[in-house]
Image: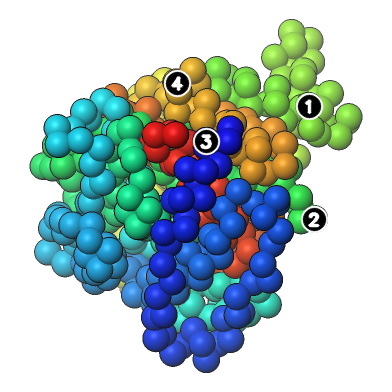
Amino acid sequence: MLILKRGMRKLLQAVVIFLTPVLPLAAQGIPPNPPPRPAASSPVPDSAALSREALVWLAQLIQINTTNPPGNEQAAAKYVAGILEKEGITPEVLEVAPGRSAVVARLRNSAISDPSRALLLVAHMDVVGAERARWTVDPFGAVMKDGYIYGRGALDDKAMLAANLATIVALKRSNAHLNRDVIFLATDDEEAGGEASIRTLIARNWDKFAAGYALNEGGEVVAKNGKVQFVAVQASEKVSVNVAVIAKGPSGHASIPTKDNAVVHLAAAVAKIGTYSAPVHFTAVVRRYFEGLAAISDDEIAKWMRSLESSDRAEHAQRVIAETNPEWGAMMRDTIAPTMLSAGVRANVIPGEARATLNIRLLPGDTIDVLLGALTKLVNDPQVRLEVQPNAGLAAPTSSLESDFYAVINKVAFQDFGGAPVLPYQSPWATDSSQLRLHNVQAYGLWPFPVTDEDLKRMHGDDERLPVASFNKGIEVLLHIVSDFAVTK
Ligand SMILES: [Zn+2]
């Protein structure tokens, strides 16, 4: 332990503060240095300096609009590469598609790399769109207000990107003695998972970032009333598949309607699909998640969490759990969300076709064909067909809950978050980790910033924001995890 602390101090003593003249932030009143914390409460005595730099990076990354589509991540890639270059870490900007790039950089532990031992730190640079009119601040302004940094990407995923940067920069500045390569990877096109995504990057450039272990977004540190309730470490994820519902019918004059109107048939099909509940399956990760959660939940809900698979009470328990928290419901079964509708070109013309898009999230191990079979039977309409759309996700193996890296994440998270339980997690959402898991990477998701449920809900929503204090804490935790796993003590 003592050796660990000495290593850590050395690591951080070397962190040099440099002043970056970023006027917008200063003008917005970025808080001055946070008050120094007593050394005993933090094994990283001067992480505040590093966090301040990283907050500037985060703000500037938010200000680079990487809304996907079109993504335009090349601008962010160049910015990230510039920071790495300044630190003497040679980055490679890999063009994946015109205007769309990824960045990779490596700290070596020896002249000859051993990819099976290497640790990959991953974050994506693109963000989902923002409906400006619904925000109270400019979504790309990186506005600082009430101790928060606001902006599209403040949660997903530019905070992690900035924290990964801070981590690799800290390792480099301290000349840390690594026991494995540490690789930094900033990806593009994560949100759409399209042609420019990590799938293409792996196909073309796997040798540049091949690793045995990875840390990515995907898990959460859930806080309430200023205290971390639990830490969820993502070890597997659901699989996203888009399905088109296509209704056909004769087109014609709207003044003489008939019963085979495609819009009516589509609406009826979507309404039926909306009532469908897929069968419940529990994966090993989800079982362990609910076991852990029951131990820290109120008696009433804990009782139902413990009855999820009991022979006589399962059905009721599953309903109570899903109604209490839709995310819990989504962890137990395949889900279907109708998300888009389109039909018609004129108010007075009956269209020959009407379409809806279903965003389906499959449990790992479930197949789309089985679900489509059930839905087709339910819809039971020869005018309607279901069609799987391109870029469907692929089911990946679950990362091991017995690996050395998982043990380190658990230990550090438990210590750094005041003894909060650390639970394995199967996220309802998809991340780049599934592609990594398909390449034998033990990839884990831990987005290390403590946030409330209320703030988590702003992810992909309006007024996305991150408490600056949580950002700082997350950097500290990330640095501890990476140091523990990759720095020779
Ligand atoms: Zn994300």
Identify the element where label 3 is drawn.
Answer: helix
The residue tagged 2 is 225
Say which amino acid is labelled 4.
Ser
Looking at the rendered structure, which numbered label has been put on residue 403? 4
Q: Position of residue 128 (x, y in %)?
A: 40, 62
Report the mark closest to the observer, 2 or 4: 4
Nearer the observer, 61 or 258: 61
Identify the element where label 2 is drawn.
Answer: loop
- In the rendered view, does 39 fall on the left or right side of 436? right
At x 35%, y 57%, the residue is: 173
Q: Position of residue 121 (x, y in %)?
A: 36, 45
Q: Distance of mark 4 from mark 3, alpha carbons? A: 23 Å
Q: Are marks 4 and 3 in contact (CB under 8 Å)?
A: no
The structure's colour scheme is rainbow
The residue tagged 3 is 3
Identify the element where label 1 is drawn.
Answer: helix
The residue tagged 1 is 295
The mark nearer the N terminus, 4 or 3, is: 3
- Asked where in the image residue 396 lies, by quadrant, the reply is top left
Q: Residues within 10 Å of mark 1 (few under 14, many from 20)?
A: some
Q: Are marks 1 and 2 in contact (CB under 8 Å)?
A: no
- In the rendered view, does 121 fall on the left or right side of 468? left
The mark nearer the N terminus, 2 or 3, is: 3
Q: Distance of mark 2 from mark 3, alpha carbons? A: 35 Å
